[in-house]
Amino acid sequence: MSTFERTTGLGSAMAVLVLATALQAQTAKTTTEAGAVSVTTTEATGVVVYVEGNRLAVKMVPDGDIRVLTVSPSQQFLIEGQNKRLADLKRGTVLTATVTTTTQPVTVRTTAVVNGTVWYASGNTVILTLESGENRTYNVPESYRFVVEGKPASVRDLRQGMKVTGEKVTAQPTTEISSTTVVKGIEF
């Protein structure tokens, strides 16, 4: 038996009725909602102390910490207006990396219509016999409305044997993150 799950999206709680995923007679509709885009920019400066293979050792400014970075072979460095690769960097070159990160919350909602027969109903709990013959238990909020004989009905209106239609709504919140890094430098 599955239980009623609550999902939240974009900071507001939304109760949803979660029904069997194996139902054959579902017609699903999927929508995507994008939230507000957040852009942050960070900058770090360091002096090249050593380069070997795809590793770069940099003395950070102003704290003096040495950081060893693994650099992608395709990474380009803009040194005094010219694109250079890691192997072209010289000791003492001052590098400034500017990282711009874009973050956007995205919620994918899938809505499907499901049919069943009330096997048991009490309080906010209903057990439905689905079209597949399987019984499922759901705890639904008072505000949820089923459709019985073309009319809306709350969980408290349901009685054994009633044919009901309900919507299964699932929400999957995710975050899309992208970043770009531009490294500029000055040779000394």
Image (cartoon, rainbow, N blue to C red):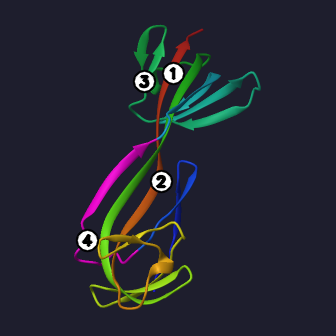
Q: Position of residue 53 (x, y in %)?
A: 48, 36
Q: Secondary structure at mark 3?
A: loop
* Nearest-to-viewer mark from 4 and 1: 4
Q: Which residues are magenta?
A: 19-34
Image mark count: 4
- Can see residue 96? yes
Residue type of the residue flagged with mark 2: Pro
Q: Secondary structure at mark 1?
A: strand
> Upstream in the sequence, badge 2 or badge 4?
4
- What residue is pinned by disc 4? 26
Residue type of the residue flagged with mark 1: Val
Above or below, 8 relative to 105: below
Residue type of the residue flagged with mark 3: Gln
* Nearest-to-viewer mark from 3 and 2: 2
Above or below, 45 relative to 174: above
Q: Nearer the viewer, residue 153 or 64?
A: 153
> Upstream in the sequence, badge 4 or badge 1?
4
